[in-house]
Image: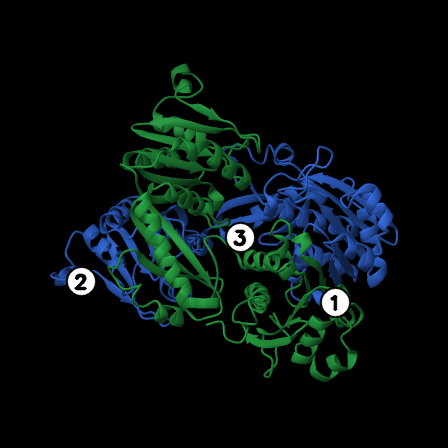
Chain colours: A blue, B green
Amino acid sequence: MRAVILSIGSELVTGLAMDTHSAEIARALGSLGVAVVRHETLDDDVAEIAVGFVAAAGDADLVIATGGLGPTSDDLTRDGLAQAIGVPLETNPEALAMLEALPNPMGTAPGILARLDKARVFCLPGVPVEMRRMLEDQVLPRIKEPGAGRVARVRTVRTFGSPESVVGERLADLMAPGRRPRVATAVHSGVIDVHIHASGSADEVDRLLEADAAEVKRRLEAVVFGEGADGMEDAVAAILAQRGATLAVAESCTGGLVAARLVDVPGMSEHLVEGIVAYSNASKVRLLGVPKEIIEQHGAVSEPVVRAMAEGVRAASGADVGVAVTGIAGPSGGTPDKPVGTAWFAVTDGAGTHAARELFVGDRATIRARAAVYALNLVRLRLSGGREQDPL
Amino acid sequence: MRAVILSIGSELVTGLAMDTHSAEIARALGSLGVAVVRHETLDDDVAEIAVGFVAAAGDADLVIATGGLGPTSDDLTRDGLAQAIGVPLETNPEALAMLEALPNPMGTAPGILARLDKARVFCLPGVPVEMRRMLEDQVLPRIKEPGAGRVARVRTVRTFGSPESVVGERLADLMAPGRRPRVATAVHSGVIDVHIHASGSADEVDRLLEADAAEVKRRLEAVVFGEGADGMEDAVAAILAQRGATLAVAESCTGGLVAARLVDVPGMSEHLVEGIVAYSNASKVRLLGVPKEIIEQHGAVSEPVVRAMAEGVRAASGADVGVAVTGIAGPSGGTPDKPVGTAWFAVTDGAGTHAARELFVGDRATIRARAAVYALNLVRLRLSGGREQDPL
């Protein structure tokens, strides 16, 4: 079975709002083995909507549209669908009979189920809670798994710390065109995901995915930090729990992002003792015990300072592991020696302190987000037996 | 001028990743007066990509595609475009001449500028920082404003702390159907945006938008915190700079988010003295001087504790203003008296301490994000002359 997903609304087309529904619906359809061909985002315009429906029904067995069902004059999904079917809704009882209203227990505008050529068309409201409920209660139960129990599934192995080209080389034979399962990489926020796609019977698919995931992990060693939707914070939380270890964080340029990512994980209060955002030099001295002289001599973004920050937060908090980051997130503050994007990291435990310098590219938010993940990864590698030096 | 935006990648079609580029590009095009017709998200499949390019070029003068330009075998945008143009790239020097490489200073894969029928086609990398830079440096300067100086612009007034229904009542006549400029509200992450849409000559549009924005601000008083893409952190940074004030932050459930949002703003080192993530009760006692007895008597999520946290971080840091948040982000830890989503806030300066209790609905990440904005808003209202009690 093939599906096209339509999202309708001028606020989406103009970019004032983000279409998050299509991705959510695609995941739900994918889990049933339905192949999603494409998504389209359409304006509140009867003709555009009608053309969108006709094109979608030409390419797919299943069309799912969201938005444009509300009470105001710019809600035109119903009119666009009527034009696509080719009959005026109001004056034609046969046309009305081709439409089935789908109940909307979370709101007022009902959904629509219709047939257009050979495709079944579902129209759902754009309000997230209404869309979600109707998708689960009305749409998914009507979609059977395609062909005698066949499913299509994706398994994702997540990596950090090695360039995409190196990951690609290590997996070259697995990623060869035409190979099944299909293996592909995608980069998000410095994380390289390895997606493994398989289809077939449920048992066969699980076996294929398991074998490929194990092979990918074996080849990429400590560069692998998780699977599926795992974030780096989940990996750090898991290894802290496994080791029964506690952590304290000292942050400058990331300004609380490292701690905030960790607190995303429920139950971190047992492991995260505290976080210090020592954004000013005075705070670095007072809260972390960084000697004022080494800040004056080496600058706040330097190896001696970051080592003192990590060791200082560990000592003050009594945590097993201390991690620290200090850097220049920009847009100003860079120098030829320490350009914008420069960051120093240190991780320390009873056995020693490891420090590293990195140069991140991007705007302020990107540099800070990358630096936070980098710091979390150092904690993970340290707790994985000191693999900061050679993850791969 | 009409544009179609294509985003290419199987991880997008399957919903494993979210397409955020199309909305960003649509906003950039809209600001130049280009009408975006639709967005499409396409699979890593040469035939689908080729069909997508041909259809887009049939409907628009301008096609902007992102993704699928990388080095691995599943990057097929170039091949899809070649098939759409109708000539094999490698063997045909004329076809190659129709393509212009666009420099990518932030990465390795160059972009492409091509002509397909009457449309100009830009292909940009999917990596956000590379896409953004190339959009700004290579694409937007090549796009002229359409039709005899007419432009379409949106101005957005941002509000926080009053329900959408109350905002709607205050603006009822401005939001009446058919009125020009069009005024509409949209809710994102607890922020209610008032969008004002106008089109016409540049001068006229600017005048209309200015008049309506001023009227909206007058009616919504201190509930308005900014315009356009301003975040609450920008509003707080601006008022800290205006007052020449310094701030210290004590966080429990938000775990560093309040500090991290502030550090998003360049130059905060002059105003944010420090942030303390006192996630454990021991840290609340040691770093913030919260008396152990009041934690034992009232619990960590309580008015006496949050007051002591705010006053403690202000005193320890020497900042002008202290703000604190403590809450239950869930999924566990709720009680009938203090359900998941309960949070206590306090803001303090030399003149006194204001505390407030809120109940947020949603998952852990949502509750924490809302609580961080709420805390920042309290700082803004306190520095706006103590309007915490009656922003509207």
Among numbered discs 2 and 1, the one appearing first in the sequence? 2
Judge whether B383 appears above or below B96 on screen. Answer: below
Is B68 or A14 nearer to us in this picture?
Answer: A14
Tell me whether marks 3 and 2 sit on the same chain: yes
The kind of secondary structure element at disc 2 is: helix
Q: Chain of mark 1?
A: A
Helix, strand or loop at disc 3?
helix
Q: Which residue is mark 2?
A: A96
- The quadrant of the rendering that contains the C terminus of chain B is bottom left
The answer for which chain carries disc 3 is A
Q: Which chain is home to disc 2?
A: A
Residue B343, given in percent of the width and then of the height, sits at 60, 74
Outermost residue to the right: A351
For marks 3 and 2, the one nearer the N-term is 2
Q: Nearer the viewer, residue A304 or A382?
A: A304
Rounded to the nearest angstrom, the CA distance separating label 2 from label 1 is 60 Å
Three-letter amino acid code at the position of disc 1: Glu
Q: Quadrant of residue B293?
A: bottom right
- Amino acid carrying label 2: it is Leu
In whole angstroms, how far apart are the C-alphas of marks 3 and 2?
43 Å
Label 1 sits on residue: A270
Foreground label between 1 and 3: 1
Q: Secondary structure at mark 1?
A: helix
Q: Is residue A54 visible?
A: yes
Residue B187 located left or right of residue A381: left
Q: Does residue B372 sit above or below A170 in this rendering?
A: below
Residue with the mark numbered 3: A203
Marks 2 and 1 belong to one chain: yes
